Image (cartoon, helix red, strand yellow):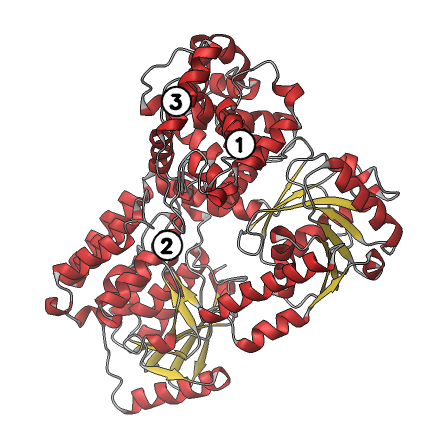
Amino acid sequence: MSEQAVIQQTQGNMSLIFMQNPPVNALSKSVRVGLIEHVSAALADDAISAIVISSQQQLFSGGADISEFSSGDFEPPLPEVLALIENADKPVVAVLNGPAFGGGLEVALACHYRVTFADNKVGLPEVNLGILPGAGGTQRLPRLAGVAQALDMIVTGKPVKASKLPGVFDLIVENPASLLSDASQFVSKLVEDGAKVKRTSDITIDPATAPAELFAQYRKGIAKSARGFFAPERCIQAVEAAVELPLDEGLVREGELFMECMKSPQARAQQHFFFAERAAGHVKDFDKSTPVRDIKKVGIIGAGTMGGGIAMNFANVGIPVVLLELKQEALDKGLALIRKNYENSAKKGKLTAQDVEDRMALLTGTTEYASLGDVDMVIEAVFEKMEVKQQVFKALDEVCKPGAILASNTSTLDVNEIAAATSRPEDVIGLHFFSPANVMKLLEIVKADKTSPDVIKTSMKLAKTIRKVAVLVGVCFGFVGNRMIEPYGREAGRLVLEGAIPEQIDKVIYDFGLPMGPFTMGDMAGLDIGYFVRESRREYIKHDPSYCVISDKLVEEGRVGLKCGKGVYLYEPGNRTPVPDPYVLDIAKQEAERLGVKQREISEQEILERIIFPLINEGAMILEEGIAAKSSDIDVIYVYGYGFPVHRGGPMQYADEIGLDKIYQAMCKYRDELGEYGKHWFEPAPLIKQLAEQGKGFASLNK
């Protein structure tokens, strides 16, 4: 097995050791064993003067095989492999023919010399899995790259071009095509000059280059972005150890900090999410034999903020777009907004002026449906009203060619009803982009009853093309994301009616890890959006006269949020900072008296449980109904679509972490304590009751 994953060739007095473990040269057990075997053999061979470690894949190495995290089989451990390399008495040269991440870079750092090309990228992204580099990365990189550079790479996990790391690499060539020949000459010269061994462990960091202020300032700088995460602080402590301790002691400290991270709920959550994102692409609705439709040109109906944002996704990857608005004025305004967005990116250095023109050249405006006759897919992004959507789809059915995919960007409406307006329901699908559509990574793909497998497969594949994370869901009101956000917003409003204050609720949710609380989010999105949705669902909520009654009052008074300077909060002109308004508490008091709701002081624990637990409960019902195929799909939707903290893994992983028995008991408690309101809204989902009684979590359903 090791011979397959690592191969050896002899070139003169050099032993060339190549990793070949597709697809990313993960440092699986077979690779670690192979490296030990071949390095040991080369060291024992008197005819060998130097050892080269490289790759026969496009990557040097993508790092650890994290599937081993669940099995716990780390034998032989990577640090053992790297100790063998570093302590070798013959020079070991890493030739990085492609990117090296995580353990892959740690292998290179343990070698005595490193060679690569200028644009190659390397990094230590372990922090994204809730851990830190555990095979010497936190100790060797500061010694080679400098403390400040290493600190930033380790704590952020962001890759860096080799050209920015002259201290790490002994030879950086400009042309990747000449890398192997240049590396061969470099190693030959080493041997000619006496083949000196140059160990990273021999480097001592001058404490003057890393004063305490450097670490203090860095901690302050990342405080907001690292909020709620466990690993970043341990990464900093590990780099501090590199400054204070010799390498062997620093490695021991690194190992201790690594295990602290591995045992943390944040690491479990982040690793869960890593796999959840990849699992979202594996669905049972099609197979390898299912054909894929060719999408070479796309039509977008509606040139507003959403339609324009969707259009940008396609132009960004070179797919021509026809943008339709019925009025020329609206079309011109939409195209101008797209250009402005691109020009703003250019000002920030993200695009060149030519990039802007190239992308705008892919966008064609029209006011005639007939112009959509040759598109391969059309995405409707018009007003969220069924009659309007159906009119659009009737028109598309008449003008679009056979085989064109007809997609709706609806966020709540029944895709089956929309499909019924056409003569080809098998070609209809929901593509729910999240706003701003050119920024948000999530794409909720909604399969209707008659959507054909090839339309689903094409849509999933296209999502990757436009750099979205796609999750396939079924049809129900709000699908997964917006259906679950409904109880979240409902309970926030009810808690204010019962005596909590908006800023208190927002703080609890912010402290939990979301980017903002429900009232700040509502004001930013516009309170009128939720109001219009409620207006279409009055029959469903008529039994509860308290349902979002405060928000309704505010909208009816014209207080729709940030865009008009007042909503739940007040806003100064040009300032997005929310200012609490006692008037909202007056409305809450009046409505509570009218409805017979007794106001009281409410604890932060109750606020958190009453807002987050019903959201999880709704997720459980979605799973029971088959609207989502896996609980991990719900987590992907909530992290990417709603800002649920990734260090909690998503709502369903969070529920598993704290225990479904706790969720069940709390739901029963509020059901019994809150009278008629509790009986209706806090009945635990049967699935939660069942799993809690079995001592299982949602993750058990994904296997």
**Position above or below: 622 against 461:** above
Q: Which residue shows up at 55% across the image and 26% down it?
A: 618
Mark linked to residue 555: 1
Say which residue label 3 marks.
586
Instruction: Please count the marks in the image.
Output: 3
Q: Is residue 128 visible?
A: yes
Residue 396: x and y in percent read 83, 50
Q: Would residue 216 appear left or right of 307 to someone viewing this image?
A: left
Say which residue label 2 marks.
126
* Alpha-carbon span between mark 3 and mark 2: 50 Å
Depth check: 346 or 147 in front?
A: 346
- First along the sequence among labels 3 and 1: 1
Helix or strand or loop: what does disc 3 sit on? Answer: helix
**Neighbour class for label 2 at 10 Å: few (<14), some, many (≥20)?**
many
Q: Amino acid at mark 1?
A: Val
Place residue 45 in its image quadrant: bottom left
Residue 69: x and y in percent read 41, 46
